[in-house]
Image: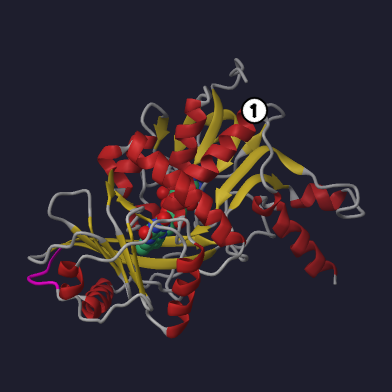
Amino acid sequence: MPTSKTSPYDVIIVGAGVNGCASAWFLRRAGLKVALIDQEGIAAGGSGAAGAFIAPKISKSGPLKDLMDKAHARAMAFYPKYFPEATLERPLFHIAKTPEDADKLRVFRERTDLELSEPPQKLTKMLNVDVSDENAVYFDHSAVVNAQELCRAMSEGVDFYRRKAESPIHDGECWETAGVRGKYLLVAIGAYPKLLELPYIQMRGIWGHRIDITSDTKLSCILHHYVSVSPTSKEGVMAIGATHNVHYSPFGTDEPYDITAGRIELIEKAGRTLKLDNIKIIADYTGLRSGSNDYLPILGPLVDTDATLKQGNEGEAGLVYYPDVFMINGSGGYGFVLAPYLAEILADHLHDGKEIDSELLPERFFKRWLKKNQS
Ligand SMILES: Cc1cc2nc3c(=O)[nH]c(=O)nc-3n(C[C@H](O)[C@H](O)[C@H](O)COP(=O)(O)OP(=O)(O)OC[C@H]3O[C@@H](n4cnc5c(N)ncnc54)[C@H](O)[C@@H]3O)c2cc1C
């Protein structure tokens, strides 16, 4: 797909979170000329706040679990190979919080292909809780990535514009927004206010807070219990994260987020699992996860609501799509696990016309929205 004279870019990506940056990496690798636009900078949104653990989903079976298994395998092959400096591979020690969690662990243990092992005694002795095969799993195949470093590295070689994209316009051949012109428009804006009129897509923003600390306590694995505690790829720095706050959003309120309360919550929850000596908080990171209504990520072309409805016999005459507009979003609390898997599918679709699995397509929400609004 050559770049035309009037279109300096093949793809304009709006949003430089992990989804935008991973897409930029795969699209560039497929030979496309990519522009990346972000109003705040690279990994400034939810992605910058992430603990960025690369772990499988510990749950019973279902479409998200199946997708996460594939995405986890892809991420564990991708990050250490292409971005070893931003990736720290460490065992994961997951401890159940409730009997329901323990039941999920039991099913995970029975069905997983991952090789489970016993946690080292030195580690279990550090804990404030008793662990057994009934309430914990320990395995090697996991990692933590440095969110900012990784996103910066993935977007290297791509033209970056620090601007707010507004009201994109299509002139029959190309899209233009924020003074940047390109054939395809990829919307990768997480839980931020919408860029296009998409009444059928409602993202759920879940606010989170993570802290980086130093401590005299040294941990050799990624520990998931009430919160996650782990070493990071920065020498001597540990991360504690993250809170889940469904009530706070930076949009539509002037109320500042209470950073002290968030710190207290994180340290208290980490302390239920292990004693961290001489903690010093060295950085706070906050942002929104962006979840879809059915918890599955969103990947694919966007339906133009007005154009579809104007056709009459809604749905019967077929859906009308915005020309060459795609979305990647809805990764919830798993953006770093899902991004390489989703971005590769997108690049294969744009470059080679490979089909995107229907369960990921944004149009699933259009059909539901239409049904609800017709009845
Ligand atoms: C506290 C916390 C902990 C997490 N922990 C993990 C974890 O351990 N593992 C994991 O896999 N995932 C984790 N996640 C989830 C993961 O971070 C998200 O799924 C991921 O960040 C979503 O990335 P994104 O690119 O879709 O959105 P974002 O990272 O939110 O990026 C969207 C970008 O779009 C930009 N933007 C929006 N509108 C415009 C506009 N009009 N013009 C220009 N730019 C615009 C924003 O500035 C922003 O940079 C966590 C998230 C949080 C908040």
Instruction: Please determine whether, in this image, residue 44 is positioned above or below residue 116.
Output: above
Of 333 and 81, nearer the camera is 81
Q: Is residue 262 visible?
A: yes
Magenta part of the chain: 276-281
Which residue is at the front of the view, 167 or 242? 242
Q: Is residue 176 visible?
A: no
Q: Answer above or below: position of 374 versus 156.
A: below
Q: Quadrant of residue 273?
A: bottom left
Residue 223: image x %, image y %? 28, 66
Q: Which secondary structure lies at badge 1?
A: helix
Quarter-of-image position of residue 160: top left
**Position of the C terminus by quadrant:** bottom right
Number of marks: 1
Q: Position of residue 292 (x, y in %)?
A: 58, 62
Give the residue at the far bottom of this rendering.
99
Q: Which residue corresponds to mark 1?
A: 352
